Image (tube, rainbow, N blue to C red):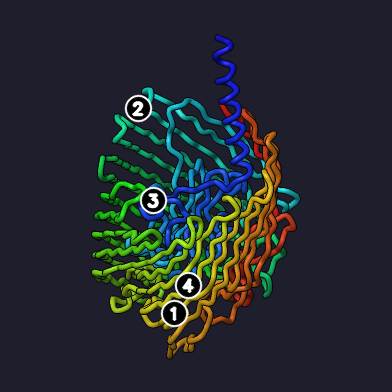
Amino acid sequence: MTVVLVPQLLSVGVCAAEEKKDELFYLEPIVVTAEKTAQDVQRIPGSVSAYTKSVVEERHVEKLYELTDYVPNVFVKKNSTENIISIRGISPMQGSLFSATGLYVDGVNYPIHQMQNLDFIDIERVEVLKGPQGTLYGRNSEAGVINVITSSPSNEFGGKVFGEIGMWDSRGGVPIYKEGGIVNLPLVEDTLAMKVAVQNYTTDGWMENIGPSSQDDATRVRHFNGRATTRWTPSDAWDISLILQGQDETDGIGVYRFIDGPYATGRNEIAWDGPNKNSVDANAQILKAEYHGTDVDITSVTGRHSYSQDYEYDVDMTPMNLYSMFPVFTADYDVEVWSEEFRIASKPGKNRRFDWLTGVYLYGEDIQTGNYSMTDHVTDQDNWGAALFAQGTLHMWERWHFNLGGRVEYARLEGEKTVNAAMMGMGVTTMADTVDDTVFLPSASISYDLTPEVMTYGKVSRGYLSGGFDSYFAMTEELFSYDPEYSWNYEVGIKSKMLDNRLMVNLAAFYIDVEDKQVAEYVSPYERYFVNAAKAESYGVELDVQYKPLPGLTLTGSLGYLESEIKDWTTEGYNAWDYSGNKTPGAPEFSYAAGAIYRWESGFFVGADVVGLSSYYANAENDRKLDGRTLINARAGYEGERFDVMLWARNIFDEDYEERSMSWMGGTLIQQGEPCSFGLLVAYKF
């Protein structure tokens, strides 16, 4: 018996050693579902950046906006209660409820900005698709799409528990705590399994309130997130998953401070006499069923998402009660979203002449928003829509591939609003309107394989950002609604893997033309309205590089160049302005990242990254410019069979930077960026 087993054990050992060597020396192939079917990311004719679980964890990326620092020409305009994602200079106007970037978690859309502040937990992969994705994703994907795919259960028992302690380098040091666990439970052998992941994140934050308010939790954060995934595979053909997600979050939102004027404070300090609090309670249920037949694959994704948010803050943001009639601004959002996507696709395989997929998409949204200050604005929206889409790829000859797709989508938004302006002597006003649109969203691309490892492509696609309602400022029915905006994206690029799969270089150039752009125009200091009054254009270049020059050493780099400006927009009357030729707000000309990580076969690793962007304008008038920034992050640790240990640091040199800037109360009010933070993460695997 021993004589028989020794060669087998040697063979297994040799294979394991070779597999480890390949992992250390060659770039990992990444399969994505960006185009609704499994594909090598390097074979998609378009700009797609993919980040696997290992990349997310080794860079200690804990939130969605932290990941976007590594993606060229992707920028997140952060504020205290939402993240507004801008891709290639395309983002919605300030005050818009819906995002121009589609965010999908396990195939289900998170439609409004407030829902896009994601904490990562047990993520399998994140895909960033740049440029309009209307054919496969429909409305509100005009800028692009971000897909977040969570980890699925397996048929082996295992998991991990983890704990983290960190520190903000401010106020003499403010602790950061995170703890949680992941467990995989096989319930029926090779048939039924469950995976549960939970985590809790707490910190008192880096900002201190030195004002008279009794609330000293200016940036206190309490985040609890959990997910349970049950996977049933009754046969080789069926794969069915039920995903249950929940989040309970409370944030102190006192991150705005005056840098000049009568109420200026020092760094990491605010002086408010009122509250600053944001609370979120949300849950989601997703049912995904896949049937893998002999000739076709059939997929159904059914989703429901309930999201509730309430926040309040001191209106004047000073230590004085300057607005005694309405000292506190409060708002609430209640969103109920359901969706169903059903699609059929040809079986993937080599030597096929034609690949195709087709499907239908249905959705409904029940959205209530309330904004309460000088006037109370309460808006109810009942939105629904349906779409039919198809896409096919013809593999002409051996190296040419032609892709053509189209989507017909109908969207209907019904809105009702009540405005109580009694405090301003104007009484109560009610209004109602309907915005509906039927749109055709085509796309076409052609690609050519210069070699089996190098592909060039050209692509054109149409984008669409739906119309909507002004839930913040509109005082009359005439100003209540606005129409959709549209865009065309033209892109050429090259994707390559060279040097025996040790070097990846992707280069893309694009031009985007936006028509009927949605903008906000002020008619008084307290009233603005949304109109489709402008044109805009964006063009630029993106470069992504990965290189493994030595076993264990991985070098990465990205560079984005962007020119994004407003065309043909002039206002009259109050705040008259000619915006034509101005830069688009929140669109840095350059964004860049460079990093290196070295892994020893023993499990030890060390790495560092530089992420940054150039200066950009905070407003459409281009009279308020924010400086660029360059941040350095680093980590070092050990990954073993049972234990993982990581030391990490973000913004090592404690660069002082601003996220937003505005004129307010006789001074300049800014949203301060995060200072230096560092910590220790320990995990036990079983």
Picture layout, residue 153 above or below residue 676: above
Q: Dot 4 lies on which element?
A: strand
Disc 3 from disc 1: Cα separation: 33 Å
Q: Is any atom of residue 469 visible in this view?
A: yes
Estimate how packed mark 3 is, as few (under 14), some (14 to 19) or many (20 or more) residues with alpha carbons within 10 Å: many
Residue 414 placement (x, y as % from top left): 25, 65
Question: As rendered, which of 660 and 431 lies closer to the eye?
Answer: 660
**Residue depicted at 69% across the width and 52% down the height:** 608
The residue carrying mark 1 is: 536
Disc 1 from disc 4: Cα separation: 14 Å
Residue 468 placement (x, y as % from top left): 33, 69
The residue carrying mark 3 is: 307
Picture layout, residue 602 above or below residue 377: above
From the image, state whether disc 3 or disc 1 is nearer to you. Answer: 1
Q: Dot 3 lies on which element?
A: strand
Tell me, for residue 510, which label it has, or none.
Answer: 4
Disc 1 from disc 2: Cα separation: 53 Å
**Residue depicted at 63% across the width and 44% down the height:** 25
As shown in the figure, which amino acid type bears the numbered disc 4? Phe
Tell me, for residue 331, which label it has, or none.
Answer: none
From the image, state whether disc 1 or disc 2 is nearer to you. Answer: 2
